Image: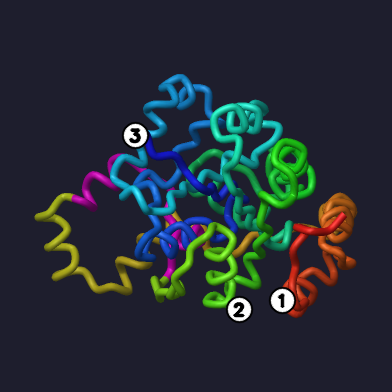
Amino acid sequence: MDKKPDFIIIGAMKCATTTLHEQLARQPGIFMTKLKEPNFFSNDEEYEKGIYWYFSLFSGAKQEDICGESSTHYTKLPTYPHTVERMKGHLPDVKLIYVMRHPIDRLISQYIHEWTQRVINTDINLAIDTHPELIAYSRYSMQIKPYFEAYGKEKVLPVFFERLLKNPQEELERICHFIGYNSRPKWHELGAVNDSSQRMRPRAWRDFLVEMPILKTIRKKLIPKQIRDWVKGFWMMKKRPQIKEDKLKPLRSIFDEELATLGRWLGVELNCENYHRVVIESPLLDWRGKE
């Protein structure tokens, strides 16, 4: 019998899903796909590979393992409009984990990521107008509502990036309880994972020269680190992007409306201004079991 995922981390992008994937993969009895972002249900080219290709990603799991995968494309409306219907058709009982962070912080982190990948080449203030996905992927209630309609709230666990950073062991235990893991998980110190702010924009000729073994050895022995870091700076984002106030005001309006809906589901008052305090200090933030 083909192994199937028991749970999926469905997003959101730039909310520590890579870290969570790695933490779960380190727990005995939990199998996470080696391919961290299969994007099977979202991307047409992946979906065309067929369901047996997807199930093959779990072929290394033991029969008793709890299986999972992580694909942030699964909460990227309107970019990938068929995700939920495809997933429901093949995995009608799967459990879902949705990780969120302050919507403006997430937007900025996505911009940095897209800038380093050369998807975006403009200032963040112009990018907000020309790349609507920066806003859309932070509209958490819009992204998660189709999953509620397809699976019900009981099947979706809300997790907050900020709370995960502050109380990693506690949050990992909560997540593992949700997926049916009976042992006590252990949070591992992994160091920085997938830190977009430290990435350099790709450049084929530079990357080829940098990775040549002989030149790599010569560079490290003969060129001081200070000079190497100075050269790297030509391809790196030197300062955190700053959103101008005339852009922040409409963003806050959009996200306050989204967070108000999220807050009603969670039973708290939530907006951009009080977000950090509420998600960190509230005893429990969960929409499961609430009307």
Front-most of residues 11 and 157: 157
Counting other residues with Cα less than 10 Å from the Cα at mark 2, is it few (<14), some (14-19), or many (20 or more)? few
Label 2 to label 1, Cα distance in Å?
A: 8 Å
In the visual, does 43 lie left or right of 103?
left
Is 163 magenta? The answer is no
- Numbered tag placed on residue 166 in the rendering: 2
Q: Which residue is mark 1?
A: 280
Identified by mark 2, the residue type is Lys
Label 3 to label 2, Cα distance in Å?
A: 36 Å
The residue positioned 59% from the left and 58% from the top of the image is: 15
Identified by mark 3, the residue type is Ser
Q: Is residue 7 visible?
A: yes
The residue positioned 18% from the left and 67% from the top of the image is: 220
Which dot, 3 or 1, sits closer to the camera? 3
**What is the secondary structure assignment of the residue under circle 1?**
helix
The residue positioned 77% from the left and 38% from the top of the image is: 149
Is 194 magenta? The answer is yes
Front-most of residues 170 and 247: 170
Q: Which residue is mark 3?
A: 56
Counting other residues with Cα less than 10 Å from the Cα at mark 3, is it few (<14), some (14-19), or many (20 or more)? some
Identified by mark 1, the residue type is Ile
